[in-house]
Image (cartoon, grey):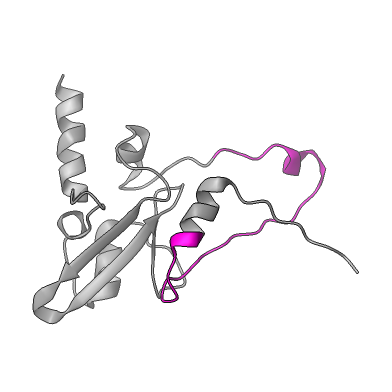
Amino acid sequence: MPTLNIHFESEIMAHLAKASANDTIHLSVSLGGGEEAATPKPVVPRGPLADLMKADLLEAGAVLTFHQPRVDRRGRAVVTGDGQLIVDGHPAPFPSPSKAAAAVTGNPINGWTLWHLEDGQTLDDLRKVLKRKKQK
């Protein structure tokens, strides 16, 4: 019988260990062979979050959340290596913070001011930090 062995880096295992029963875990498996498979291609961030990631202000695996107390709504998303957001309960990643937020709220909404990191900073706060860095 064929066997498939999967190796996860320690950061991924730590992320999986923190996941709750309500979290959606996305795994991608690429099957291939030859020299192409031996040298993985680096993942390059694209899209709206790319500049924040390239400036080391936002990293792949970062967890973003929001809470709207008035309507008792919460959202949780994880930043992918290519700069997309995987939102709990949704099968496909979203290319922008606002599209990810709209998927949770059901309404057009500014995801830059809605999503925040564990330390409370919003994505918009990170954009402001990046803008200040570029001005120096």
Picture quarter containing residue 54? top left
Range of the magenta residues? 17-42
- Residue sitting at x 44%, y 61%: 18
Kindly give the residue lying farthest to the top in the view shown.
Answer: 136
> In the rendering, at what x and y percent does residue 71 appear?
13, 80
In this rendering, would 41 be left or right of 46? right
Where the N terminus falls, by quadrant?
Answer: bottom right
> In the rendering, at what x and y percent does residue 64 appear?
29, 57
Asked whether 72 or 81 is in front, the reply is 72
Kindly give the residue lying farthest to the bottom in the view shown.
Answer: 71
Q: Main secondary structure of the magenta part?
A: loop
In this rendering, would 13 be left or right of 135? right
Q: Is residue 88 magenta?
A: no
Kindly give the residue lying farthest to the left in the view shown.
Answer: 70
In this rendering, would 89 be left or right of 134? right
- Residue sitting at x 87%, y 65%: 2
In this rendering, would 67 be left or right of 104? left
The number of callouts visible is 0
> In the rendering, at what x and y percent does residue 102 appear?
25, 70
Picture quarter containing residue 29? bottom right
> In the rendering, at what x and y percent does residue 67 appear?
18, 68
